[in-house]
Image (cartoon, rainbow, N blue to C red):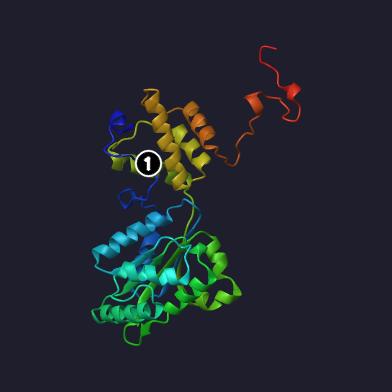
């Protein structure tokens, strides 16, 4: 809606994961490098964790683009609220296995044949599971057993990447999953941005959208955006998108603090150090005593 007004080629703060807007912060660069290394080195199990909105799915989209460019076969499980039967069915569909997708036995035989074929060609195969913290225990056990598919000469035939929130780490610490935990060779973790990373992230997205030298967010406003978003990329996107929309509605090309206040109120954001606001916005008012709310004219 506001793209033409600000001169953007496309929306800079789209909430959908988009590898073309991938910001290569040091931690994201390192995590992606570890994922690629783990795949090529046939490490078997790799775990990627991070709080909600820190860019895990965007990271996986970048990895998928890389795997496509290298002609590496992979299956991507994006819905982890599944049964074991649905799990094998999704693998069969994604890898295009020539078998009955509803028969676990046939899927396993076809999968093993594909893995051996790829291994003989010097290639590997990858299973990516997003939102893995939601997986049921029996599905996690099936995934562990898939890690047994290996060959003495070719090593691990299937590289398995589990991505999820910090709950995934706690889940893997459970005594009944100790066998799976022992097989995890690489762990990557994404955390929220520091102030400078937030500023660079916003500049990067604006530049990729067509504004090489950003002029809409003053430096002091960027600091406030960082504080209120707590450095979480998804929240940064939501705040900045709403700021641009507000500025467009007011026909202003410079965002201001009062706009940010309105946006944060509409989004019902909380952040460390946020001043508690009283009913009606009046100082000294006691929410438990309606009589304490007086008009400024009084």
Instruction: Name the residue: 38% across, 70% down.
Output: 89
Q: Which sits in the foreground, 64 or 191?
A: 64
Instruction: Give the answer, above or below, for where 180 lies relative to 256.
Output: below
Instruction: Name the residue: 39% across, 66% down.
Output: 128
Residue sitting farthest toward the top: 297
On the question of residue 152 being in view, the answer is yes
Q: Secondary structure at mark 1?
A: loop
Task: Tell me the quarter of the picture where residue 159 sits.
Answer: bottom left
Task: Tell me the quarter of the picture where residue 170 sits.
Answer: bottom right
Residue identified by numbered label 1 = 13
Instruction: Name the residue: 51% across, 29% down.
Output: 262
Q: Which sits in the foreground, 142 or 2?
A: 142
Instruction: Name the residue: 61% across, 39% down.
Output: 273
Location of residue 211 in the rendering, given as x and y in whole percent from the top left corner: 29, 36
Can you say which quadrant of the picture contains the C terminus?
Answer: top right
Location of residue 271 in the rendering, given as x and y in whole percent from the top left corner: 57, 41
Instruction: Give the answer, above or below, for where 287 lies relative to 271.
Output: above
Q: Which sits in the foreground, 105 or 141?
A: 105
Can you say which quadrant of the picture contains the N terminus?
Answer: top left
Residue sitting farthest toward the bottom: 152
Location of residue 22 in the rendering, given as x and y in whole percent from the top left corner: 34, 51
């Amino acid at each position: 809606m506001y793209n033409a007004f600000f001169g953007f080629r496309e929306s800079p703060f789209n909430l959908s994961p988009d590898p073309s807007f991938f910001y290569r912060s040091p931690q994201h660069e390192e995590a992606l490098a570890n994922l690629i290394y783990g795949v090529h080195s046939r490490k078997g199990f790799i775990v990627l964790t991070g709080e909600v909105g820190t860019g895990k799915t965007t990271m996986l989209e970048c990895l998928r683009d890389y795997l496509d460019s290298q002609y590496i076969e992979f299956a991507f499980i994006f819905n982890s609220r599944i049964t074991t039967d649905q799990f094998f069915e999704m693998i069969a569909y994604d890898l295009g296995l020539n078998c009955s997708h509803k028969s676990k036995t046939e899927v396993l035989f076809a999968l093993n044949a594909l893995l051996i074929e790829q291994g003989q060609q010097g290639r590997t195969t990858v299973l990516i599971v997003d939102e893995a913290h939601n997986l049921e225990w029996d599905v996690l056990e099936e995934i562990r057993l898939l890690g047994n598919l290996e060959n003495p000469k070719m090593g691990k035939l299937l590289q398995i990447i589990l991505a999820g929130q910090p709950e995934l780490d706690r889940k893997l610490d459970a005594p009944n999953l100790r066998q799976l935990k022992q097989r995890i060779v690489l762990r990557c973790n994404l955390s929220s941005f520091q102030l400078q990373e937030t500023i660079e992230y916003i500049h990067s997205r604006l530049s990729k959208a067509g504004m090489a030298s950003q002029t809409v967010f003053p430096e002091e406003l960027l600091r406030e955006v960082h504080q209120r978003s707590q450095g979480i990329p998804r929240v940064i996107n939501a705040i900045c998108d709403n700021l641009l929309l507000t500025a467009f509605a007011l026909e202003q090309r410079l965002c201001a603090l009062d706009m940010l206040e309105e946006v944060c109120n509409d989004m019902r954001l909380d952040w460390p150090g946020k001043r508690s606001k009283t009913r009606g916005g009046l100082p000294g008012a006691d929410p438990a005593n309606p009589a304490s709310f007086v008009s400024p004219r009084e």
